[in-house]
Amino acid sequence: MFRSLFLIPLLVLSMNATSASEVKLDDWAMNPLSAYVSEDKWNQINDDIRNERIKKENQNRMFGQGKVITVDTRNQKECKSLQETLIRNTAAPMDQLETICAINADKPFSSFVVVGDQYRTPISFDNLSDRQQKLVKQTRNFTALGAAAVGLLWAMPESVTKWDKDSISEAGLGDKWKENVKAGPVKDKDDWVINYVGHPVSGAAYYTVARHAGFNKMESFGYSVVMSTFFWEYGFEAFAETPSIQDLLITPILGSLMGEAMYSMGEKIKDNDGKLFGSKSVGGFAMALMNPAGAMLDGINSVFETEVIKSSKTYFFTEAPKHHFDGNPLHNDDSIIGIGIELKF
């Protein structure tokens, strides 16, 4: 009898313990959103929002974001206080910050652009020779043409460019560039017209620009190699596709041969008083065909050298890694290093 009474409470306790362990409070069921969406779906939505925000922050960081700040120089106390704060906490050029509080009765308001979190080192071309400075300017102009060319190619059908636009948009420019650079070079599948006509013409443009700037054959060939490799294949085009083995070889080699023939023909026409078949009109047209890139780049130069653009600066910049609000880095890189061009209108 004693033994039976002792076992019954134990059995009851065991049953109660089992029931308690099986009962689990569902926290998501207490959330008002549970009536409209599952917990997994809600977590996925949050992840998508966070990834999209990080993607936009990465894109903003890649291209840089500037803030226009306008100060009233008549209030020297407030202006000086702002000046000290900007010197301590921004990456604005020092020569610009030192003059923002200069009093000008005719123009009391001073405006400038600050790009946050960047540390800049100006690049000076003053020590370069005349021909080197000319080539630097033409390289700058090639950059403007390169950006325009990418825009034109982007508007063309994918059947022509072989660019996967959806993949590029989804990955983001920076990540897509890294992916393509790491994957290449490979043998591309572009149409023969692009590979064996378009790219040699581009290589000839690089070559003839250097030749007209005063460089010899080997120096101009070297410039064509550098531009076709780092400016285009591993530069602009790498944002869209993997660098191509054919293009790395064909562009500078065939392009330089074509470019030298065009340059020699142009020099003969020039020595003949600009005439071809006895006509200066025909000679002028042929000269333009012999150096089409030079004509376009000179046109860009005329824009840069007008009063529309007051001044331009080129600089190296570095930027420390940014972190999301949860403390995680936006990407794996420790920092960003690049070259910037600042134009003042």
Image (spheres, rainbow, N blue to C red):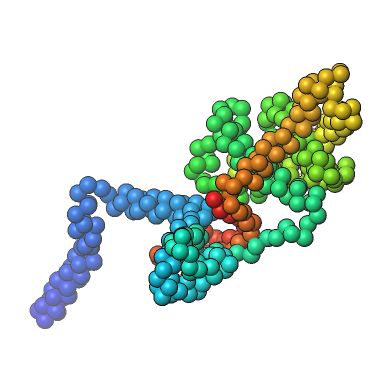
Residue 228: image location, x then y, percent: 74, 42
Up the image or down, 250 lies above or below 313; here it is: above
Q: Quadrant of residue 1?
A: bottom left
Up the image or down, 314 lies above or below 291; here it is: below
Up the image or down, 184 lies above or below 269; here it is: below
Residue 268: image location, x then y, percent: 89, 29
The answer, for residue 90, to whether it is visible in the render is no
Q: Is residue 139 left or right of residue 239?
A: right
Residue at horizontal 23 percent and vertical 66 percent from the top: 21
Seen from the viewer's position, the closer of residues 28 and 97 is 97
Q: Is residue 72 left or right of residue 290?
A: left
Seen from the viewer's position, the closer of residues 33 and 295 is 295
Residue 42: image location, x then y, percent: 31, 51
The answer, for residue 227, to whether it is visible in the render is yes
Q: Is residue 152 left or right of residue 207?
A: left
Residue 221: image location, x then y, percent: 83, 42
Residue farthest front in this picture: 105
Q: Quadrant of residue 254?
A: top right
Seen from the viewer's position, the closer of residues 76 and 229 is 76
Residue at horizontal 82 percent and vertical 34 percent from the top: 259
Residue at horizontal 54 percent and vertical 54 percent from the top: 62
Count of numbered circles in the view: 0
Q: Is residue 245 left or right of residue 273?
A: left
Residue at horizontal 67 percent and vertical 47 percent from the top: 140
Seen from the viewer's position, the closer of residues 191 and 271 is 271
